Image: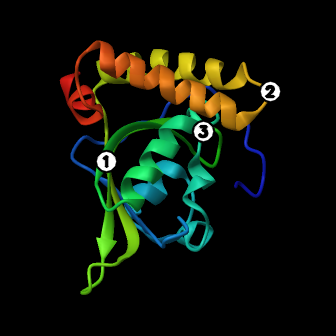
């Protein structure tokens, strides 16, 4: 979790399309590597990021169910793509199209995670802003956060099922 509460400003940050945000984490999600683009866009220095939980950039507009899906997927040894709204150190937000993969040792054991994040296309951001707003509202409508997360996950799966797609097909169909 964040050490200090950062109030969102409502301002969005972007970065050049040809730059990629890269980070690596250990098995607990603590940052072990952050490239310059990550530091520039997030507003954090390397010292402020290293050994911190990756959730240091978690925006409150992000549904918990999306992070559960992400963690369940990578912990099972699979890659995942996701649209994520992050929070910069100064409260600005920035959207990414993330590709998160497990990192394996020579015995095939997961030893960490690697994420490349690109600037998403604007029309996809607008679609996910709306979907995530609905998912967060569903999560918050329950007194128990776990029940809210499960209900929102079911809602997300329903959206995907209506399109007769897998999650990955849904992400790439936009």
Disc tally is: 3
Comparing marks 2 and 1, which lies closer to the viewer?
Answer: 2
Q: Earlier in the sequence, mark 3 or mark 1?
A: 3
Q: On screen, 5 above or below 172?
A: below
Q: Are marks 2 and 1 in contact (CB under 8 Å)?
A: no
Q: Secondary structure at mark 1?
A: strand
Residue drawn at x 27%, y 30% is 171
Mark 2 vs 1, N-terminal side: 1
The percent coordinates of residue 170 (x first, y second) are 26, 26
x and y, in percent, of residue 149 in the image: 61, 33
- For mark 2, give the secondary structure: loop
Q: Is residue 91 found left or right of 121 in the rendered image?
A: right
Residue labelled with disc 3? 59
In the drawing, does residue 137 fall left or right of residue 41? right
Disc with the residue nearer the chain's start (3 vs 2): 3
> Residues under labels 3 and 1: Cα distance?
19 Å
Of the 4 image quadrants, the one containing the N terminus is bottom right
**Which residue is pictured at 46% across the width and 53% down the height?**
71
**Tags 3 and 1 in contact by the CB under 8 Å rule?**
no
- Give how far apart the Cα atoms at labels 2 and 1 are: 29 Å
Mark sitting on residue 80 = 1
Residue topped by disc 2? 143
Q: Is residue 24 left or right of residue 47?
A: left
Residue at 61% x, 67% y: name it. 52
Element at badge 3? loop
Residue 105 image position (x, y, % from top left):
29, 83
């Amino acid at each position: 979790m964040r050490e200090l509460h950062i109030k969102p400003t409502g301002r969005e940050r972007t970065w050049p399309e040809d730059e990629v945000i890269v980070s690596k984490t250990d098995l607990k999600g603590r940052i072990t590597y952050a490239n310059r683009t990550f530091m520039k866009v997030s507003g954090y220095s390397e010292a402020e990021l290293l050994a911190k939980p990756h959730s240091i950039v978690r925006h409150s507009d992000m549904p918990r169910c999306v992070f559960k899906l992400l963690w369940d997927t990578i912990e099972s040894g699979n890659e995942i793509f996701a649209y994520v709204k992050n929070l910069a150190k100064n409260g600005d937000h920035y959207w990414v199209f993330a590709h998160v993969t497990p990192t394996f040792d020579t015995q095939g054991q997961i030893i960490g995670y690697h994420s490349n994040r690109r600037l998403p296309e604007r029309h996809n951001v607008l679609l996910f802003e709306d979907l995530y707003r609905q998912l967060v509202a569903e999560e918050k409508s329950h007194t128990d956060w776990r029940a809210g997360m499960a209900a929102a996950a079911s809602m997300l799966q329903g959206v995907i099922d209506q399109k007769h797609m897998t999650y990955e097909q849904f992400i790439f169909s936009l």
